[in-house]
Amino acid sequence: MKDTPPAELLACPVAPAGFPEDATATIPASVRAPAIALATAYAGLTLQLVRLINWNAPGSCR
């Protein structure tokens, strides 16, 4: 790579805190399905970003 990206673009993503394990909720299917789709997309994008950062600076993100 000719130019190194700025440091803020090479910062490893930090996962947000998840839902509390001791809480329960009833979520209608019309809300649950899009929530799962958003979480799945977020996970995929995070993995893609980690792979890109590690490609540029191997071993940066674990």
Image: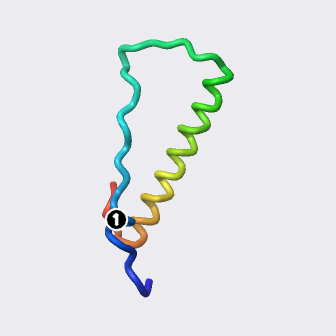
Name above or below for residue 55 compared with residue 39: below
* The quarter of the displayed image where residue 9 is located: bottom left
Report which residue position mark 1 lands on.
8
Name above or below for residue 19 compared with residue 7: above
Amino acid tagged 1: Glu
* Label 1 crowd (10 A; few <14 / some 14-19 / many >=20): few
59 vs 56, left or right, is left
Please provide percent x and percent y for residue 36: 58, 32
Q: Residue at x 63, y 24 (%)?
A: 31
Q: Residue at x 58, y 31 (%)?
A: 35
Please provide percent x and percent y for residue 20: 36, 22
- Total marks shown come to 1
| Secondary structure under the numbered disc 1 in the rendered image | helix
Name above or below for residue 41 compared with residue 35: below
Please provide percent x and percent y for residue 32: 61, 24
Q: Residue at x 57, y 45 (%)?
A: 41
The residue lying furthest to the right in this view is 30
Please provide percent x and percent y for residue 29: 66, 20
53 vs 44, left or right, is left
Quadrant, the N terminus: bottom left
Quadrant, the C terminus: bottom left
Color style of the picture: rainbow
* The quarter of the displayed image where residue 22 is located: top left
Q: Residue at x 63, y 32 (%)?
A: 34
